[in-house]
Amino acid sequence: MPSFRAAHIYALVASTKFWRGMFATLIFIAVWEIVSGIGLSRIPAPSAVALTFNDMMRDPSYWFSWYLSTKRVFAGFLVAMLVGIPLGLAMAVSRTFYGIVFPVFEVLRPIPPLAWVPAAIIFWPTQELSIDFVTFLGAFYAVVINVIDGAQTIDVRYFQAARSMGSSSWDIFRRIILPGTLPSVLVGATVGIGIAWAVVVAAEMISGGGSAGSMGGAAGGGLGFFIWNSYVGGSYTQIVVGMISIGIAGYISSALIRKAGELATPWLRDQ
Amino acid sequence: MVNREASFPTPQASMGLADAPAADHLGQRSERARRFEKTLYRIGNWVRSPRPYLMVLGFALFLGFWYLSVEVWKLPRFSQMPGPTTVIREWLSPDPTYGLSAYSPEYYEHIWVSLRRVSVAFILATFTGVPLGLYLGWSQLFKEYVFPVFELLRPIPPLAWVPLAIIMFQGSETPIIFLTFLASFYATTLNTMLGVESIDVSFVRAAYCLGAKRRQVFWHVVVPGAMPFIFTGLQISVGVAWFSLVAAEMVSGQYGLGYLINTSYTMVQYPTMVIGMITLGVVGYVTSAGVRILGNYLMQWRARELAMGGDR
Amino acid sequence: MSTLPETRQAPMMPGEPALRRSGSRKGEIHIRNVVKIYGSEESGVRAVDDCSLDVPAGEITVVVGPSGCGKTTLLNAIAGFHSITSGTIDLDGEPLCGPGRLKADPGPDRIVVFQNGALFPWKTIIENVAFGPIVQGRLSRKQGYEKARAMLAEAGLRNLEDSYPGEISSGMRRRVEIVRALMNEPKILLLDEPYRALDSLTKSVMHEALLETFDRNQVTIFFITHDLEEAIFLGHRVAIMTTRPCRPKKILTVDIPHPRDYSVLTAKRFREYLDETIAAVHEEALKAFAAGERER
C-alpha cells in the first residue's frame, strides 16, 4: 500500500531518533573533513572523495568492476546455498551423517577462506573459478552452521504432533523441517553474503595485486582490484570511493536477501 | 500451626539428583571430586556411543579421498596438489626439502608472529568493543547518536581498508594490527550490544524494585546478564580476527602464517603451503576454544544451569 | 468483613499524614479512575478505562480476569514500570502517580514477583536474597548476608544458600524470590501470576507457603491470577475484572478465616464463592474470546 510507505517515511523523518543519527553522522563527516584539511593525516577529504565519486559514476569501467565483483559474490553464494542447505539438513536429520561429516567440517572451518586462495589457484583451471571457490567457502560455513542450528531448534512438539496425525517421514521433512529451518537459513544467508563480499574483495586484491603480484593473471578487475589499483596508482580518493562502493554493494545484497526472506516466511511477520 | 519446615521437600529431594551440589561441610573439595567424576562419566558415555567411530570414519574418508585423488589415481587437477603423505613427511622431516618443518625454528616464528598480532588486536578490540557495546545497549540516547555512524562504516569489509590502513599508519605492523582490530571490534561491539538488549526486562525491573540505582543496575544486572552473549561474540571475534589477519598478511607483510602461505605458493613450495594452512586451522581452533573455555570458567552459573537442562 | 487477626495498623486520623517507615507497614492503595491507553488517543489500545479499586492494607487482594484484559497494566502502574494516561493511584495517602506525574518510580516499598521469576541467575541464592538491603546501603554486606540467612532458614530454605537459581526447582525459586522481596520490608507485594508456570502439585505447596509467610509478615499483597481456585483460596477479596478495557466488574469478599489450609477447598462456602466467580469470569472470557484476544 503506497500510502503506508509514505506514512512510514514521514514518521521516520519526523522522529528525533533519525535526526540524532543524522547529526552524529554529519559531525563525523565534518571532523573527517577538518582532519584531512589540516593535513593531520594523508586520508583524503570527504569533499574530494565526493568529487571523485561523481567522476567515477560516469566511468564505465567503474561499473564494470561492480558487475565483476557482484557476479563473483553471487556465484559463490548461490553454490554455497545449493550445497550448504542440503548438507546442513542432512546433518540435522541423520545422526550418523552428522557424526561422519561434522568433525571434518569443524576442522576445516578455522582455516580462513583466504588461506585457500593459492591452493584454489593451483587447483582450478581459471582464476575466475578460484575466486568463486573461495567466495563459496566463505558463505558455505555460515550457511551450514545456521541450517544445522535452525533444524535443531525446531520444537520437538511439532514432530510429535505430525507423527500423531500420521505423517510419513518425507511429509515431516517437507512440511516441518523445511519451513522450520527457513528463518535460520535466512540468517545464514545474510551472514554468508556479507562474508562472501569480504572474501571477494580480498581475493581480488590478492590475485589482482598484492605483494605477490605474480599471482595476477588474466582475470582481474572487480571492486577489490579497483581499490588496490587506485592505491598503487596513487589515487587516494579513488580508494575511498571504492571502499564506499563495496560498503553500499554489501549492504544492498544483505538487504535484498533479508527482503526475500521476509517474503518467504510470512508467518513470522507479526512477531 | 503445622511445623512447616518438616512438610516442605528438601532441595535434594525436589531436584531428584544424587549429586546435588548443596553446600556441605566438606566444602569445595568434594565439589571438585564430584565434577571430576561427572566428567569421567561423560567421557565413558562418549566412548561407548557411535560418535568417536563416526568421527574416525569421517576423517578417514576425507584423508583417503585426498590421498587417492592426488597420489594414487592422479586425477587431472588434483595431481598438482601435494598429497597427505608428502605433507606429513615434509612436516616431520628434520631436513625438509623446502626448508620448513616442525623442526625449523622459522616455523614457530611464523606462528608466533601471527599469534602475537591476533592477540594484540583481539585484546584491543575486546577492551574497546565491550564497553562500547555495553553502553550502546544501555543508553538509548547514546545509541541513537552513535549507532548510525557505526552502522555506516560496518558494511565496508575489513580488507577494503588495507590501502587506507597502509596510508594512515607507519610501518608494516600497525596496519596489519589495525585491520585485524577493526574486524574484531565490530563483531565484539555488535554482539555485546545485542547481549545487553536481549536481557529479560524483568531482571532490570526487579533490580529497580529492590532499590538499586541506575549505576548499580548496570553493574549487577546488565553486565553479568550480557556475559553469555559477550563470550559468544568473542568467539566469533577471534574467528574474524584470524580471517582479517591472514588476508592482511597475504597482501602486505613479512612473517606470519598468511605470509608463509603466500610466499610458499609463489616459490612453488606447495607442501609448505599446505603445512601453513593446516597450522592456521589448528591455531585458529585453539584460540577460539580458549575463549570458550575462559567463558565457561567465568560463568559457572551458566555452565551449571545448562547442565541442569536450562529449565526456567 | 474478613476476620483477620489483629493487624499492626494504627487508626488514621483525618488529616494525619501517612506513616512511612516507622515500624508500621501499611500498603493501602487507592486506584481512582485510572485510564491507560497504549498509543494515541484515537487509535490506541485502551487497556484500562476508568478503573477504580481499593486495596486495603494488610490483606491479600486478588485480581482475576481473562488474559490480556489489563490486569498487569494496573500492576505495572503501581510498581512504576509504566505510566498511566489519567487518573490517580495513591499509596497510604501519598500520590504514586497522577496528574502532573504520570509514572511512579519503582522502589522497595512496592516489590514485584514476576511471572517467570526474576532471580538473578548469575548470583547465588544468598547473594540474590541479600541484594536489596545491600544495594540500598541500609545494611553492610555481612549484615545483609546474616539477615538473608536468617530469613531463608525461617522459610525452610537454608540449604540452598550457595546454589545458583539455575540449579534449583522453579517452586523453590519462587519462594526465594518472595524472601528476597520481604528482606526489604515492603509495604506491598505485587505478584504477577507468579505460579502460572508451575504444576498444580507444586502450586499447592506454594500457596501454603505464601499464606504462612503472610501470617508471619502481614504485608499487603496484590495478586494477579487466572486460576479462580487459587484466587479464592488465597484472597481476602477477589476483584473480577472485565475484559479490555479493564474495570472491576465484581468484588467478592471471601469470608473464610485465616489461617487457611487445604481443607478449605472442599468447604461448601468455597464452592459457593467459586460458582459466583466462575459465572462472572466466564461472561468476560467469552467477550474476550469473541474479541480475539491473544494469549500472552
Image (spheres, rainbow, N blue to C red):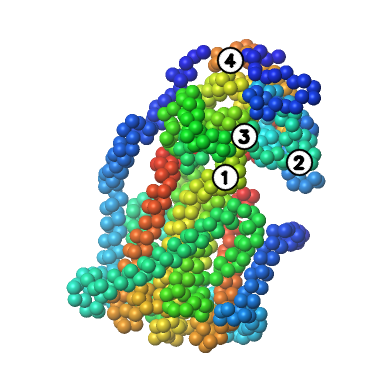
Which residue in the structure is indicated by mark 4?
C259
Going by the numbered disc 2, the residue's amino acid type is: Arg
User: Which chain is indicated by disc 3?
Assistant: C
User: Which chain is indicated by disc 2?
Assistant: C
Q: Residue B201 versus residue A197: which sits nearer the camera?
A: B201
Q: Residue B54 versus residue C231: which sits nearer the camera?
A: C231
Measured in 3D between alpha carbons, the distance from the residue under mark 3 to the one under mark 4, in whole angstroms, is 27 Å
- In the image, B269: left or right of A133? left
Q: Residues within 10 Å of mark 1 (few under 14, many from 20)?
A: some
Measured in 3D between alpha carbons, the distance from the residue under mark 4 to the one under mark 1, in whole angstroms, is 38 Å
Callout 3 and callout 4 share a chain: yes
Going by the numbered disc 4, the residue's amino acid type is: Pro
Which residue in the structure is indicated by mark 3?
C108
x, y percentage for residue C193?
60, 31
Q: Residues within 10 Å of mark 3 (few under 14, many from 20)?
A: many
Whether label 4 touches label 1, CB < 8 Å: no
Going by the numbered disc 1, the residue's amino acid type is: Val
